[in-house]
Image (cartoon, grey):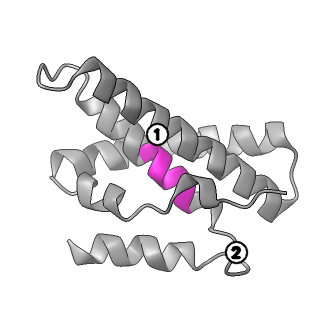
């Protein structure tokens, strides 16, 4: 669905400058990968390695979101990590619903690279 990709791209441009992606974009991607992982835990067709890789990708986006949050809000690492964890937890049901509606993979495909986050 083109609207999903456009939304991710538009939100990535919300940051103050072109070098930083809004922390919520990374947090949404963390929640999206977590929903993908969680919603398919019982799928016998998904290998253990694939499952581990998807969970690790969620964690990478979570860390990128915390780095971006800290840089964009000038908050400490612990405060940024807590804000990201709260955001992911609060938004996870939205991404599970997207998965059930068949829209999550298109969203995930539009996520920016996690290693492109703001780093000081």
Q: Which of these two is toward me, 47 or 71?
A: 47
Q: Above or below — where is 26 with respect to 86? A: below
In the drawing, does residue 101 fall left or right of residue 76? left
Q: Above or below — where is 11 with respect to 29? A: below
In the drawing, does residue 113 fall left or right of residue 32? right
Badge 1, how many Cα within 10 Å: few under 14, some, many 20+? some
**Disc number at residue 19?**
2
Label 1 sits on residue: 57
Magenta segment: 25-31
**Disc number at residue 88?**
none
- Residue drawn at 64 percent across, 51 percent down: 65
Residue 23 located within the stretch drawn in magenta: no
Residue 22 falls in which quadrant of the image?
A: bottom right
Tag 1 or tag 2, which sits nearer the N-term? 2
In the drawing, does residue 119 fall left or right of residue 13? right
Q: Where is residue 42 in the image (x, y as percent from the top left)?
A: 19, 19
Asked whether residue 76 appears in the rendered view, the answer is yes
Q: Is mark 2 on a helix, strand or loop?
A: loop
Residue 72 falls in which quadrant of the image?
A: bottom right
Asked whether residue 89 appears in the rendered view, the answer is no
Q: Above or below — where is 44 with respect to 117? A: above
Q: Position of residue 10 (x, y in %)?
A: 48, 80
Q: Position of residue 77 (x, y in %)?
A: 82, 41
Q: Is mark 1 on a helix, strand or loop?
A: helix
Disc 2 to disc 1, how far (Cα)?
21 Å
- Residue drawn at 54 percent across, 36 percent down: 59
- Residue drawn at 48 percent across, 39 percent down: 58
């Amino acid at each position: 669905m083109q609207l999903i990709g456009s939304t991710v791209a538009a939100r990535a441009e919300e940051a103050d400058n072109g070098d930083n992606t809004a922390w919520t974009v990374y947090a949404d991607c963390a929640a999206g990968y977590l929903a993908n992982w969680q919603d398919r835990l019982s799928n016998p067709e998904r290998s253990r390695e694939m499952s581990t890789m998807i969970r690790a990708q969620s964690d990478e986006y979570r860390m990128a979101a915390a780095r971006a949050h800290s840089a964009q809000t000038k908050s400490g690492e612990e405060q940024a990590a807590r804000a990201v964890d709260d955001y992911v937890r609060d938004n996870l049901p939205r991404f599970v619903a997207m998965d059930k509606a068949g829209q999550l993979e298109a969203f995930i495909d539009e996520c920016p690279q996690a290693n492109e986050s703001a780093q000081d």
